Amino acid sequence: MPASKAKKLGTLFRSAIKSKAAAASSSFSKSLSSPAEDATLKHLVSSLDSDSGNHFYLFVWSPRNDVRLSRVQGFVFSVELVEFFSWISCFNAEDLTRQLPTDIFSILCGGTSDSPDLQEIDDEKYLDRELDLPWFPDLSHSAMPLRRKEVSRERKQKWTFVNTQGGRFYKLVDMCADKLGTETTIQVFDKLGKETGVKESNALIKRCIEGARAAPDEVVGEKHMHQAFKIFKSMKEQGYQLEEETYGPFLEYFVDMGMTREFCFFCGLIKEENPSSLSRLGYYEMKLWTRVDDEKKIQELCNCIESYDEGNKSILQEYYLLALCESDRKKEIVQLLESMDITKFSSPDYIFRCLGRLLLESFAEKFLLEFKACDCATVNTSNLIYSYVVGIPNLAVEDVISKFKNLHTKLEVTPSSASYVKLIKYCCDSLKVHVALELVDEMCERGLSFSMEALHSILYASSESCDFNLVHQIYSVIGRHKLKPNSETFRSMINLCVKMKDYEGAYSMLSDLEKMNLAPTAAMYNAIMTGYFREKNMYGGLRVLKQMTEADVKPDSQSFSILITNCNSEEDINMYYEEMKRSGIQFTKHVFMALVNAYAACGQFEKAKQSLNEIKSVLVQALASHGQLSDAFNTYEEIKQAGCSLEPKAVISLIEHLQSDEEALSRLLLLLETLKDPNYWLDGCVRTILYCVRHKHLRPAVDLLEQLRDQVYTDELFLEVIFDQVFSYIAESESTCLQFGLDLLHAMKEELGLIPSRKCLDFLLHACVSAKDLQSSLFVWQEYQAAGLPYNTLSFLRMYQALLAAGERQAAKVLQSKIPKDDPHVRCIIKSCKTIYLENEKEEKKKKKKKKNVM
């Protein structure tokens, strides 16, 4: 699929998804078949040789358990399509066909947007629009409660992926560069070929230039810049549009380094590729000449502005002025200001701050009057007055406010709510709370709207400046002007009351919540409780807990942290600890620290160590999940030496992220022995088995499967799912050899006394197809009968593929005659298999003939 179509497809699909996401997600669980069933179909599809580029099949497992097939011709994967299919897997197939615009079908098929009639088209047409491509997870363990929680989290992550994809990718590039180095990272991403798009290239360029800036010497810096230029050249050759996000880092680097020749050469390249960037390049050019202090070049740029047409002239003037303002070149700024229309600028706020900084009041007043006279309205003009007055250097807060008011009066401009709010926050940043409150009164008297965000700034500034007594004045402002505070407003005010030991005022505010149609929160009571305990008033603190219960407010983690910290006995600590566990409240860092300190204060040092161990377990889990396995195991060893045990979640995290090395298997088995909880043991055991399969450790895998069989012997379905998962991994893994799968099948039958399921044999037969191993294919084919499993259409098609792949055309022809061909989808698969495998056979013959002629 061409890149343009792929991009259009991604856009159309995302627009369809956003409108129907909520409705479709409710039917999600109904639409999914079992993971192993989905994987069976996926392997049948993927075994068709995709190198031909002619056909690509998508399977749908329908409620009737029959195979459905859709074909897309000329299909080529792209980043957008991967995202497309990952989204599709979240939706029910029937809902999806109703939601997708007809344009999507058109893009996929390369034809018109009219959907085809399945009953009227022949095998060459597209046979179905139900696209429900399942994604087979790395660990299918739905019988375990822990795994269900992981799946739930994965589904939630799918919804947030698109919004956070950009930021995560830049983090990925940084992480790779930190671990591997910039050059190796580029080589890794270079393997993506055409998949490396603008976003990826820009991230790599940015990283290279950051490396050049941090280089210890010129040689290393040049090496980084060379890598950046290679990426830039690749983008240029691929026809990508060179926007500022691409060329900006280069120009900034040349400017900062004063590299004039390189700058001019690079600008020439940008102008050729992107003529529309001319005005923006002017900004960087002016920055360069101010950076190297070339008066002649600066004057040339200022003088040549008049030669541009009116539209480009205004844009160029703004960019030149922005660059000059950054370097405070007053002479050139004045020269430009005398001949420009600032009302056409896109960022006048920054210009007015500069006018204030350079004390150019005459120009400021002139431009403010121009803004007032044009269609920009008084709101923008008032904001510009604020920008100007706060830019004036060495001006006290009171003088800034006075200047703000005087300019409004002088220019006959009405102050706006936005400019007043900015002024209030400016006062709060300077901890001038009294002045800010006066501005609030002025706003309300003028009838201007007031945001609670500004009031929160005042409350925060009151706390920072220790002006706690101002809380009553703030509360009075709220009541006098009928403002609408929220729960956070009351929490902050109650906290200020407590800090000045005004508990009566704090409780008075709690009782006023009902008048404001607000409910009390745990955070409000926590503020009062903290105050009592700070004064060692244990009775008062515990009374607050009782009041919370009477008000039907449930304590949160902070509440328990406060209570545990102030316990005087081990019994009280245990009581709150158990109550917190019963309540299902998450244990936070503050709770763990409170437990450590409380146990230590009571002389229970062993329990303090155990609580510290829980903190270390969280640390182990975090280190392992972020690839810091060496540090994770070092911390684990510290926990063992202290006579403590690692939390089960941390053990699972170590098992999951452990890399292959000489000691990996022994470590995994030791970790598995530490898991006493049955659910966690099952989770860890399955992960360890998959590790053994991945690295061809047959004997440990069989031993673990035997333990697993003994553990869940009453749950045959669960055991079948595990074996299906193991064999599916063998089928889809390029590194796991076919012989390993055959040996495992033998052990399964002879040592474990288990009969393989249809899916196990399906996966094993797929591995035979991939290996083009005729003898193994025939062996597995006989195993269906040995297991009492009748051949179905799927197994016939799989064996047909195996025969063709092994070059047994006559046998394949005989088997084809036995395959039911009522379903047009089956006919399509047969035809595609013939095309692909016979073409491959012809190609091999041509190569052999050519090689023979050469010899």
Image (cartoon, grey):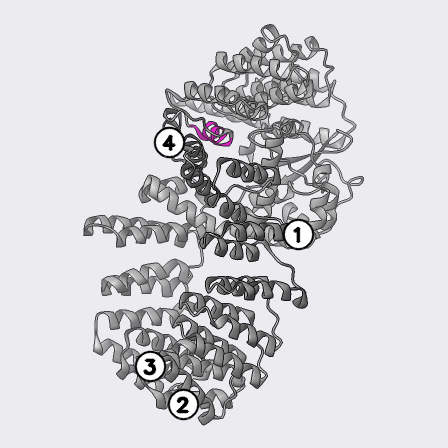
Q: Residues within 10 Å of mark 1 (few under 14, many from 20)?
A: few
Task: Give residue 842's quadrant in the image.
Answer: top right
- Spatial CA distance of label 1 from label 4 is 44 Å
Which residues lie in the magenta part?
A: 649-658
User: What numbered label is drawn on residue 635?
Assistant: 4
Q: Earlier in the sequence, mark 3 or mark 2?
A: 2
Q: Of the residues tagged 1 and 4, which is closer to the observer? A: 1
User: What numbered label is drawn on residue 395?
Assistant: 3
Quadrant in which the C terminus appears: top left
User: What numbered label is drawn on residue 728?
Assistant: none
- Spatial CA distance of label 1 from label 2 is 62 Å
Q: Amino acid at mark 4?
A: Thr
Question: Horizontally, is 36 left or right of 631 in the view?
Answer: right
Q: Amino acid at mark 2?
A: Glu
Q: Position of residue 605 (x, y in %)?
A: 40, 32
Q: Residues within 10 Å of mark 4 (few under 14, many from 20)?
A: some
- Spatial CA distance of label 4 from label 3 is 55 Å
Residue visible at 62% across and 58% down in the picture: 520
Disc 1 target residue: 550
Q: Is residue 112 visible?
A: no
**Residue 58 position (above or below residue 371):** above
Q: Earlier in the sequence, mark 1 or mark 3?
A: 3
Q: Earlier in the sequence, mark 2 or mark 4?
A: 2
Q: Viewer-proximal residue, 73 or 608?
A: 608
Q: Earlier in the sequence, mark 1 or mark 2?
A: 2
Q: Earlier in the sequence, mark 1 or mark 4?
A: 1
Tell me the SS state at disc 2: helix
Q: Earlier in the sequence, mark 4 or mark 3?
A: 3
Residue visible at 58% across and 27% down in the picture: 47
Disc 2 target residue: 365
Q: Viewer-proximal residue, 487 or 18?
A: 487
